Image (cartoon, rainbow, N blue to C red):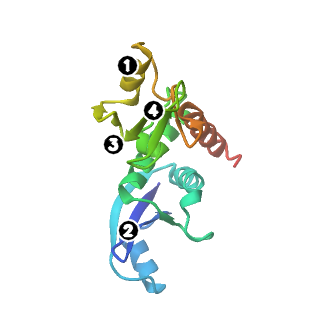
Amino acid sequence: MGIIYIIENKWMPNVVKIGITTDSVQARIDAITSYSAPLGWKVSLQMKSEKFKIIEKFLHILLSKHRIWRNREYFNIEPKRAITILKYALQLCESVENNRKNPKVPLTVFAPIDSILVFKEDDSKQCRIVDNNQVEYKGKTHLSLSNLSAILLSDQNAGGTDNFMYEGKMLKDIRNEYVKLMKKINRKQY
């Protein structure tokens, strides 16, 4: 059993350290501070898990484009978004391991708040991520991306990730990549 943690430092806004420990997170903070890192660390989230190494590897790969230093665990990402991604990773790991349906992906796992998602049928139809679930389209907030898809397609069964893209990639394809990556790491093939 170990702990996966997200810590942040008041002197480094929107930078988090994502790591693991079998000791306490405070002991880890003390060690980091002794290496000449600035004081001012606070714990954003810590979670115990038997799969802590798998979760850490998944997060580090998933957030690689946000990594500040190649061989360090510091990421330029909002702490709130990092927490959402960590919670999703824990759920995904559990669902993959137990062959259960994969959890719903919060929108902020795909992209930060205020990011623009593009409708696949018409790229002039774009929405903005408001929070983990809600999007704004033409000044109106929708409870979910699926809700907006249902309206745009006049189909109550329309899935949100099936109909929207982020940075030219279908959300369903991004979600499927996350699942494949977790399966690969779980099988220790990564």
Q: What residue sits right under mark 4 in the picture?
A: 103
Image height of 72 relative to 6, above or below: below
The 10 Å Cα crowd at callout 3, few under 14, some 14 to 19, many 20 or more, is many
Check whether the beta carbons of the residues at disc 4 and disc 2 lie within 8 A of each other. no
Q: Residue at x 42, y 23 (%)?
A: 149
Identify residue type, mark 2. Glu
Report x, y in % for residue 181. Answer: 62, 42
Q: Residue furthest right?
A: 189
What element does badge 2 sit on? strand
The answer to whether any part of residue 21 appears in the image is: no
x and y percentages locating residue 173 in the rendered image: 60, 33
Q: Residue 32, how many percent across, how many down?
A: 45, 78
Which residue is pictured at 42% across the width and 54% down the height? 82
| C-alpha gap between disc 3 and disc 1 | 18 Å
Outermost residue toward the left in this view: 140
Q: Which residue is mark 2?
A: 8
Q: Which residue is mark 1?
A: 151
Q: Earlier in the sequence, mark 3 or mark 1?
A: 3
Q: Which residue carries the number 3 mark?
A: 130
Residue at screen point 45% across, 42% down: 116
The answer to which image quadrant residue 33 occupies is bottom left
